[in-house]
Image (tube, rainbow, N blue to C red):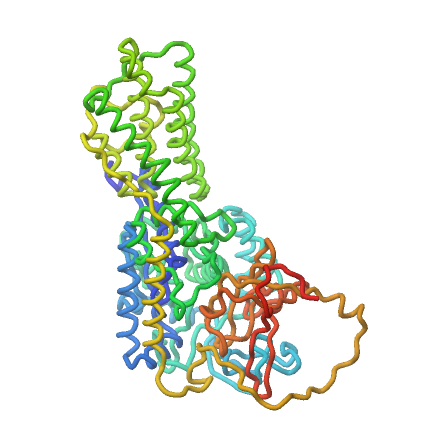
Amino acid sequence: MCNHCKKPYYITTAIAYTSGKPHIGNTYEIVLADSIARFKREQGLDVRFQTGTDEHGQKIEEKAKAAGVTPKTFVDKVAGQIKTIWDLMNTSYDKFIRTTDPEHEEQVQKIFKKLYDQGDIYKGYYEGLYCTPCESFFTESQLVDGKCPDCGGLVQPAKEEAYFFRMSKYAQRLIDHINSHPEFIQPVSRKNEMMNNFLLPGLQDLCVSRTSFTWGIPVSFDPKHVTYVWLDALTNYITGLGYDCDGNHGERFQTFWPADLHLIGKDIIRFHTIYWPIFLMALDLPLPKQVFGHPWLLQGDGKMSKSKGNVLYADDLVRIFGVDAVRYFVLHEMPFENDGVITWELMVERMNSDLANILGNLVKRTISMSNQYFDGVVENKGQADEAEAIIDQDLKTVVLAAVQKVQDKMDELRVADAITGIFEIFRRSNKYIDETAPWVLAKDEAKKERLATVLYHLVEAITIGASLLESFMPETSKHILEQLHTEKRLLSQMNEFGRYPSGNKVTKEPQILFARLNLKDVLSKAEEICQAQAAEAKMEEPSGNTTKEENPGQVQSIKPTQAIDLEPKPEITYEDFAKLQFQVGEIIACEEVKKSKKLLCSQVKIGSRVRQIVSGIKAYYSPEEMVGKKVMVVVNLAPRKMAGILSEGMILCAEDENGNLALMKPEKDVPSGAEIC
């Protein structure tokens, strides 16, 4: 069927920010999107799959300056790294857009002018009390003890000219759309968060330009301003299709817009479900059909730090496990709504149990027995007595049910569940071998036709499973089918069991799909990677002495000073103190809060629960240094938003007379969740 006859399907990932090489958590998203895109193609859709890079902003400008290169040179290098990793992971994107592409920049300028001309954008001022490290303005009522509510630092009166978008103009229209389109925001928990925390309380107008840095797309009619963040980044989804603000849209835009699925991380769901739809409403364009905010892939051993060498990158993992094993792991280990965990140990376990044993050994045994007993010829003799027929039918039922399960789960974007469905075929096939015992049948000449039937059923089941596997592990699927000397089965051909050509011949020598790995050897290789990363990090450290302002990402220690006397607070009773709940928390993930110089967002494991806590400590600890630390946490503090992000507790620090901070940590190693009393 030609593409013009197929139903179009447009899927995008968030565009990766070009501040550095993406780790495995970033890479997960492109692999997830690729599996969905590939499966939609299998369903007969005309798929357009777009990804790319977000390349403007103050952070890029500062990093380029620190590296002694121009911002364009800097982003060219990082965008190249990102594209190389996307290609390494065998992702089948159709378009890799960069926000520095001339055609994108041209359309962003036109969009800005159009929205300004129709009154949706107006010039105004940021005015109020300004926190320099956080680059944020606050009113007097927003301050906490007279200080910045985000980082606790000093603020001073300031004023900056900027352009703003009138968000409130479209807020009710967006609320109505979300209420009438329950599928628009997925999972449902993300929808509830957006409605209750942002839309229903009322939207403030959004800043869409800045003058404090220059690395951005200039506002065409006011070039001292550059377009700020989201009006630039989000519009890639339409400019990459050939959208033209003047109305002369390309054929792809007319075919594929509105998008069927924006696949993004849960941390940027607000921008894609509030800002982006409102921009589209202002441009009189239809809204995307669905925005899915996927969970995070977290490092489970709690020691992610480049200086320690424990940041996991896709290329390092591929060198040890192979592309498809890494694809399998990140897809299979991610729940639908909750965060997933990755460790070296868990990857080895999955490699040995799921891939080498359940799948690889099944394929090898089946091909080997076909060669041993029938010189590789696979024939369906249809031979089974009453008891054997029951066993055969159960195999067929499980296989065909798995086909339907995979399709149902993929329609719901439950990719991990779909993969589990495929492996149910392989597990049941292994059980079928145990039930039928081909090696026993081979000893009885009268059972030869039954033996042939058993092996045929195994080959047929593997063919269906391998064909389903193509969307998730494309090279593995290809290698299995090549060994069976058959073509990939179409989804439309999987509604019955028994299409493998009777009399076909499998390969003479079965390949080892996945070799079992020794954990000790893998950990040894991991240690080599650690050492290489640590050496690289050391080479990247700035020479000479740096101040906190010059190098805010580095951890600074508190130097010994004279004792500090504080103004005493009002006396409290023991009952007052007993209301506070202090526990030990282990930081399992941490990242910078975008566009904030002081805030870090940590995922803190407290017992069996993970809490998100935002802290103004970026000047003293890098995200990499935070991960793995055990800290003191106030866990029953009422949740509050900091820079628009919900914080569910407080990490305790000590502060010296100069304002330097140090985390409060237990003296000895105690489990996360331990009570501090």
Q: Is residue 259 above or below residue 171?
A: above
- Exactly how many numbered labels are in the figure? 0
Q: Is residue 581 left or right of residue 272?
A: right
- What residue is drawn where x is 59% and y is 73%? 664
Q: Looking at the image, which residue is at 34% across and 43% down?
A: 472
Farthest-out residue, bottom: 562
On the rendered structure, is 572 left or right of 284? Answer: right
Q: Residue 399: x percent and y percent?
A: 39, 27
Q: Quadrant of the N terminus?
A: top left
Q: Position of residue 617 (x, y in %)?
A: 53, 75
Can you see residue 10? no
Q: Is residue 392 above or below residue 47?
A: above
Q: Residue furthest front?
A: 520
Residue nearer the viewer, 597 or 557: 557
Closer-to-camera residue (435/571): 435
In which quadrant will I find the C terminus?
A: bottom right
* Residue for point 78% across, 80% down: 570
Instruction: Determine if residue 556 is in view.
Output: yes
Q: Which of the 4 image quarters holds residue 427?
A: top left
Q: Is residue 612 left or right of residue 235?
A: right
Which x, y percent locates residue 35? 35, 46
Q: Nearer the viewer, residue 343 or 458?
A: 343
Q: Position of residue 174 (x, y in %)?
A: 53, 56
